[in-house]
Structure formats: C-alpha cells, structure tokens
C-alpha cells in the first residue's frame, strides 16, 4: 500500500497508522473480536482452563497490534506496511 499524502496531511509527514489499514484491522474490530473470543470461550464450555489461556493470548494480541506496532510506526521503526 503506498503512503500518498492526503489533503489534510503535510507533505513529508507519515499518514496516520490506522488510515492505512482495512476495516477488519481497525482498533474497534480487534477489540470486538478479542472480546467475542474470550466471552464465547466462557459461554460455551464454561471451563476456566480454556478461557484463561485464550484471555492471555488475546491480551498479548491486543498489546502487539494496538500498542506496540502503532508506536513503532510513529517512531519510524517500520519501513513499509503492506
């Protein structure tokens, strides 16, 4: 995906991270999917040994994709996002 400057963005400045992502990779969809996975893992089997590891995995997923990757992009540590 090319990072062309938009009308509301000065030339030479990076586009906003989330504007480069499709709808299914937006913060609301990442949060909603994680909540559905954890809630579904408790609602259906009602086993803590299933829900707890899924909750930890979802928290790690959120940390990676909602915190670390956008921060790396803002700091210029990501060369190209495709």
Image (cartoon, grey):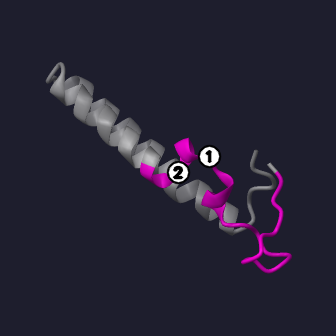
| Mark 2, other Cα within 10 Å: few <14 / some 14–19 / many ≥20 | some
Residue 26 against residue 10 in the figure, above or below: above
Q: Main secondary structure of the magenta part?
A: loop
Q: Viewed as shown, does residue 36 lie left or right of 44?
A: right
Q: Viewed as shown, does residue 79 lie left or right of 73?
A: right
Residue 33 against residue 26 in the figure, above or below: above
**Which of 59/12 is in front?**
12
> Within the image, what quadrant is residue 48 found in?
top left
Pointer 1: what residue?
Answer: 22
Pointer 2: what residue?
Answer: 26
| Mark 1, other Cα within 10 Å: few <14 / some 14–19 / many ≥20 | few
Q: Quadrant of the C terminus?
A: top right
Mark 2 secondary-structure assignment: loop
> Within the image, what quadrant is residue 68 found in?
bottom right
Q: Viewed as shown, does residue 63 lie left or right of 46?
A: right
Residue 63 against residue 48 in the figure, above or below: below
Residue 52 against residue 25 in the figure, above or below: above
At a point 64% along the width and 59% down the height, the residue shown is 19
Measure the C-alpha gap from mark 2 to mark 1: 7 Å
Q: Which residues are magenta?
A: 2-28
At a point 51% along the width and 58% down the height, the residue shown is 67
> Within the image, what quadrant is residue 56 found in?
top left
Reply yes or no: does residue 20 show up in magenta.
yes
> Do the CB atoms of the residues marked 2 and 1 lie less than 8 Å apart?
yes
Residue 52, image x, y percentages: 25, 33
Residue 72, image x, y percentages: 65, 61
């Amino acid at each position: 995906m090319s990072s062309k400057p938009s009308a509301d963005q000065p030339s030479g400045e990076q586009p906003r991270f989330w504007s480069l992502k499709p709808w299914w990779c937006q913060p609301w969809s990442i949060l909603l999917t994680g909540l559905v996975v954890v809630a579904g893992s408790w609602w259906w089997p009602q086993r803590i040994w299933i829900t707890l590891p899924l909750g930890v995995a979802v928290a790690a997923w959120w940390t990676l994709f909602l915190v670390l990757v956008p921060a790396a992009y803002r700091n210029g540590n990501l060369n190209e996002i495709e």
